[in-house]
Amino acid sequence: MTTALTTGPALTVTAWRDYDPEACGLPGMDLGERELTGPVDAESDGLWELGARRVRLARPVDLAGAGNPDTAEHAVRALSLVRDLTARAVLVEWELLLDPAAPDDAWRALGHLQPPQRLEGPGEAAEVLESWRRGHYLCKCLWRQGPGFVQIRDRRWGDLRRFTADEPEYREAIADLSYGAPAADVPAAVLADFLGEQLVLQVGELAWWLPYRVSRWLQEGMVL
């Protein structure tokens, strides 16, 4: 049985009811600083229901230091929040530290997420960040649950790539990986398939599901 992460290090965020910085300064727009200690899916839903449309993470997401278990857990929880809020088109202000030894295009695995405010790690970090911002749009890498199957639609590399599976072990693995799980607990063949398609990110000893589940379509389904 896979031991999926449910809770972990607290995430400190500041939230507002509007996207625009000027509007955020108006009375009633500031939701203040909040400590998120519960499961990320519930915390993300709670922020949305409070009216949060702009959320700032207090601490950088550190993938360069993911060899430390505490750092890895924080990174997975923070990335989960960024992913879930991106799926709702919430403006997320966050910072990302990538491993300088990672391949130059390692950032593309995260390119469907709201671009960070600051990026460290790649040799040409400013250019990478500009490419990320120019190429970002909603529904770039998502998954959906059909009757007896799951399908991922991925445009992070420009072309449309589809991954469809009807085996129950794939659906179970997605549920376990959605908010992070020890990589060693995931069925090896399933994990290998997901890693091969770059649908899972390894963060230290943890594995984390990259695509977000679509909350709303921006275009007709036949276009996507």
Image (cartoon, rainbow, N blue to C red):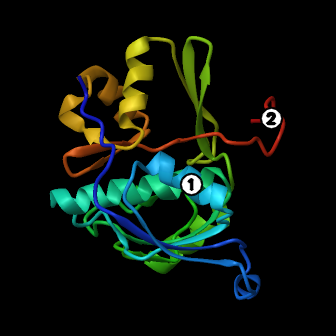
Decide if residue 59 is on the left or right side of residue 137. Answer: left
Where does the image place residue 75, in percent across and percent down from the top left?
A: 33, 60
For the point 56% across and 47% down, which residue is it? 157
| Within-10-Å neighbours for mark 1: few <14, some 14–19, many 20+ | few
| Within-10-Å neighbours for mark 2: few <14, some 14–19, many 20+ | few
Where does the image place residue 124, in percent across and percent down from the top left?
A: 43, 77
Where does the image place residue 197, in percent across and percent down from the top left?
A: 43, 34
| SS at badge 1 | helix
For the point 70% across and 88% down, which residue is it? 25
Checking the image for residue 20, the label placed there is none
Q: Is residue 174 visible?
A: yes
Residue at mark 1 to residue at mark 2: CA–CA distance: 31 Å
| SS at badge 2 | loop
Image height check: is 46 above or below 188? below
Q: What kind of residue is marked 1?
A: Gly
Where does the image place residue 92, in percent across and percent down from the top left?
A: 57, 67
* Picture quarter with the C terminus: top right
* Picture quarter with the N terminus: top left
Circle 2 is placed at which residue position? 223
Image height check: is 160 above or below 50? above
Q: What kind of residue is marked 2?
A: Val
For the point 52% across and 77% down, which residue is it? 117
Circle 1 is placed at which residue position? 46
Among the two numbered marks 1 and 2 on one chain, the one whose residue lies closer to the N terminus: 1
